[in-house]
Structure formats: structure tokens, C-alpha cells
């Protein structure tokens, strides 16, 4: 390999020529793993499973809405909330660790933490409805949990876009970086067909 092109010859290339060479080399091995037969089958099974879950959950939610009692006393109330807050604390800690170590897992941590914050706000507000704690629950949701969740979701989006931008530049690609909805799994080229 070294005998084919010397480092000095590579240095003699213009920036555009190096970028073109880099794109050509990447294109030689730029295969989408999801196009392999075994992954195509798995992807199909996952899609069928997800659609089946949605098809089952829609009527199930309607049934719950019609049959659940208006008032319910739970014997495990404190355990449920303590467990939820422990999970939320673990999500914060995991996200902090991943950000500190500069790991891509920070994206997952931010999405999970943001989701738990939205769930916390939802349950606080809904379960305090009609009680004296309702105004405090709404205030903490609107002023604390929901804005913080939005920051986590925005942070995850920013990290994904920054990663795509870095890969775009390092691969020597030119032109505007694709929008997040155009980025495919395992490749950063623009989506051609949409469904694939």
C-alpha cells in the first residue's frame, strides 16, 4: 500500500483532491450493515413487532379508560415513588458520567433522563389533581421538570448533530451537512428513498 502512493505525493495534493480521494476510499467500503440479509430479516421482524404493539396498545388504552376506577388506594405508593426517583437519580448520574467521559452514551442518557422528567411531571400533576398539592405540582412541572427535560432533549439532539457534522467533515464531504431526518443508520449520506 505504501509503495502505491507516498506520503509526499499525498501532501502534494490539494485539499479538494485529498477530500475526493478520501470519499472514493470510503465509498469502497461504505456498506450499510442493515442491507445484509440477516439484518434485513431482523429489521422486518422488529417492524412487525412494533406495529403489533401499537395495534394492541390502542384498544388496550381505550379499555383502561373505560374500566379503571376513579379512585384507587395503593399499598406500595411510597415504594413506587422512591423507586422512580432512584431511577431518575441513576439516569442523572449516568448522563453526568457519560458527558464527563465524552461518551456517545451521553445521548442515550439525556434521552432517558428527559423522558423520566416528563413522566415525573405527568404523574405529579395527574395524581395531585383536585388536592391542595396541585398548584405546587403544576409549578414544579412548568418551572422545573419540563424545562429541564427540554434541555436534555435539546442536548441529545445537539450531540447527534455534532457527531454527524464531525463525521461529515472527517470523511471529506463537501456541501451542507444533512438534516437529522436525512441521516440514515450507519451512514451519514443523505437519505435517497426515505423508506429503504
Image (cartoon, grey):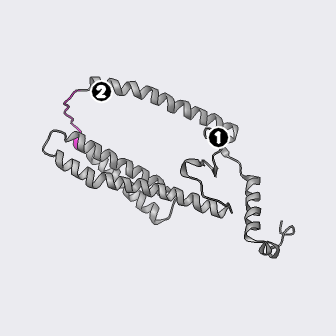
**Predominant secondary structure, magenta span:** loop
Where residue 104 appears, as percent x and y from the top left, is: 52, 58
Q: Residue at x 59, y 62 (%)?
A: 166
Write down the region rendered in magenta: 69-79
The residue tagged 2 is 65
Q: Is residue 122 above or below residue 153?
A: above
Q: Earlier in the sequence, mark 2 or mark 1?
A: 2
Task: Identify which residue is drawn at 33% across, 23% down.
Answer: 63
Judge whether residue 79 can be spotted in this image: no
Tell whether position 72 is magenta: yes
Position of residue 50 in the picture relative to residue 172 (left or right) = left
Q: Quadrant of residue 7?
A: bottom right
Q: Residue at x 38, y 47 (%)?
A: 115
Left or right, 61 with respect to 177, comes to left
Of 37 and 188, nearer the camera is 188
Q: Quadrant of the C terminus?
A: top right
Q: Is 47 rendered above or below residue 94? A: above
| Tag 2 secondary structure | helix
Tell me whether circle 2 and circle 1 mark residues in contact (CB < 8 Å): no
**Which mark is in front, 2 or 1?**
1
Q: Which residue is mark 1?
A: 193
**Residue nearest the observer in this picture, 95 or 148:** 148
Confirm whether the magenta stretch covers residue 14: no
**How far apart are the alpha carbons under marks 2 and 1?**
39 Å
Which residue sits furthest front?
Answer: 175
Left or right of residue 154, residue 66 in this image: left
Q: Nearer the viewer, residue 26 or 43?
A: 26
Amino acid at each position: 500500500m505504501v509503495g502505491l502512493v507516498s506520503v509526499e505525493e499525498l501532501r502534494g495534493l490539494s485539499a479538494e483532491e485529498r477530500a475526493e480521494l478520501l470519499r472514493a476510499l470510503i465509498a469502497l467500503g461504505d456498506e450499510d450493515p442493515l442491507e445484509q440479509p440477516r439484518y434485513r430479516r431482523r429489521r422486518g421482524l422488529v417492524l412487525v413487532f412494533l406495529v403489533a404493539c401499537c395495534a394492541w396498545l390502542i384498544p388496550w388504552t381505550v379499555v383502561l379508560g373505560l374500566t379503571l376506577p376513579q379512585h384507587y388506594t395503593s399499598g406500595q405508593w411510597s415504594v413506587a415513588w422512591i423507586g422512580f426517583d432512584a431511577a431518575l437519580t441513576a439516569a442523572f448520574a449516568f448522563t453526568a458520567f457519560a458527558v464527563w467521559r465524552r461518551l456517545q452514551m451521553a445521548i442515550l442518557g439525556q434521552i432517558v433522563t428527559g423522558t423520566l422528567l416528563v413522566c415525573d411531571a405527568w404523574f405529579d400533576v395527574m395524581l395531585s389533581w383536585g388536592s391542595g398539592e396541585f398548584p405546587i405540582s403544576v409549578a414544579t412541572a412548568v418551572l422545573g421538570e419540563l424545562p429541564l427535560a427540554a434541555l436534555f432533549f435539546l442536548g441529545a439532539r445537539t450531540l447527534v448533530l455534532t457527531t454527524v457534522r464531525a463525521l461529515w467533515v472527517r470523511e471529506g464531504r463537501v456541501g451542507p451537512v444533512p438534516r437529522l431526518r436525512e441521516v440514515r443508520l450507519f451512514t451519514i449520506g443523505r437519505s435517497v428513498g426515505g423508506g429503504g
